[in-house]
Image (tube, grey):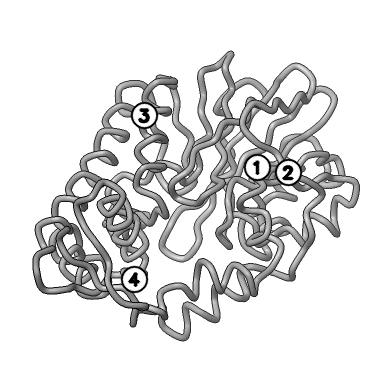
Amino acid sequence: MAVITQVADRTFRVESTLGRRRIAQWLVLGSERIALIDTGVAGMIEGQIVGALRELGHDIGDVAEVLVSHADVDHYGGNAEIRRLAPRATIRSHPSDRPLIESWATIFAQRYGWYRHFGLDYDAATHAWLHDASGPDVPLDGTIAAGDRVELGGVALEIIDLPGHSAGHLGFWLERDRVLISVDAVLERGLYDIDGTLISPPPYVTASGYRTTLDRVAGLAPSRLETAHYPEIRDDAVDAFVDASRRFADRLEEVIAGQLGDDARSIAELTAVADRELGPFSEMSNELARSVAAHLEDLECRGLARSVGDQPRWLAA
């Protein structure tokens, strides 16, 4: 059963569990329109959001805006359900993530199947879960990006770019209450289970983008940071969370740079070392490879590393 918490004026967090992890979506109940941020995995609209809206005095058909934060199955997999149950709702995401959200084949090729090129992969059960969780392909109605405002009547969401975890990850800023719905844009040392045990790494696709996001969140100085997979983060704990995220990125870069020399190293080899140094991670440990690759590309841009071969191996520059 979902737990509903008011996090700002007219804004409610709907938290449930997904396996061993917590997961949250948000409902913003304007006087004129209702917005839903993220649709979860397939089944979560009927399983969680319908009941949450009913408890808040509304019907699922009242949803007018669906804003997808980024391209991961646990954030867009309910799109087909919301399309069926709230046919008048407009579903939008950032333009960079839209092709992945609309097509399982595309997100598999660029996101979930990416690891296979480097001798890494999810297990068969996880692959099956990812496919099922993504739901049927659903075309979106449009895009949304930094600088846009979603006016709902008495409350407005300011859209900000928070890249890194994905190319087009969005954040949602409630300026009056100083609440930032950052979803997966800031990922500390990784994801924890509901008992507080670190289980999986924080994946991001660009190191520079991730650091830009950390700086942006710190600069906004929110009184409350709303994430999808962590408990409530408020006041001074926000700074501590962002700082821990920055320390992880810095330490990962240090570990990778320390492994580079005259002997070329593969992403799989470097990921194994990083897992030992920063984990170990018991679930989806292959996702650490995305962050490893992000730092390698950043080091190369700075003239500190170079890649060789079609399936790249990495050397010190």
Q: Residues within 10 Å of mark 2 (few under 14, many from 20)?
A: some
Quadrant (top left/top right/bottom left/bottom right) for the N terminus: bottom right
Is residue 245 shown above or below 153? below
Q: For the residue labelled by badge 1, is the local secondary structure a helix, a strand or a loop?
A: strand
Q: Position of residue 29 (x, y in %)?
A: 74, 29
Mark toward the start of the polypeptide (4 vs 2): 2
Residue picked out by circle 1: 37
User: Alpha-carbon distance for marks 1 and 4?
Assistant: 28 Å
Is residue 130 shown above or below 89? below
User: Alpha-carbon distance for marks 2 and 3?
Assistant: 25 Å
User: Alpha-carbon distance for marks 4 and 2?
Assistant: 30 Å
Residue picked out by circle 2: 143
Residue picked out by circle 4: 286
Give the residue furthest to the bottom.
124
Q: For the residue labelled by badge 4, is the local secondary structure a helix, a strand or a loop?
A: helix
Q: Which tag is nearer the camera, tag 4 or tag 2?
A: 2
The residue located at (25%, 51%) in the rendering is 299
Mark toward the start of the polypeptide (1 vs 4): 1
The amino acid type, in three-letter code, at marker 3 is Asp
Residue picked out by circle 3: 215
The amino acid type, in three-letter code, at marker 2 is Thr
Q: Which tag is nearer the camera, tag 1 or tag 4?
A: 4
The amino acid type, in three-letter code, at marker 4 is Asn
Query: Along the horizontal axis of the image, is 141 left or right of 301?
Result: right
Is residue 313 shown above or below 23? below
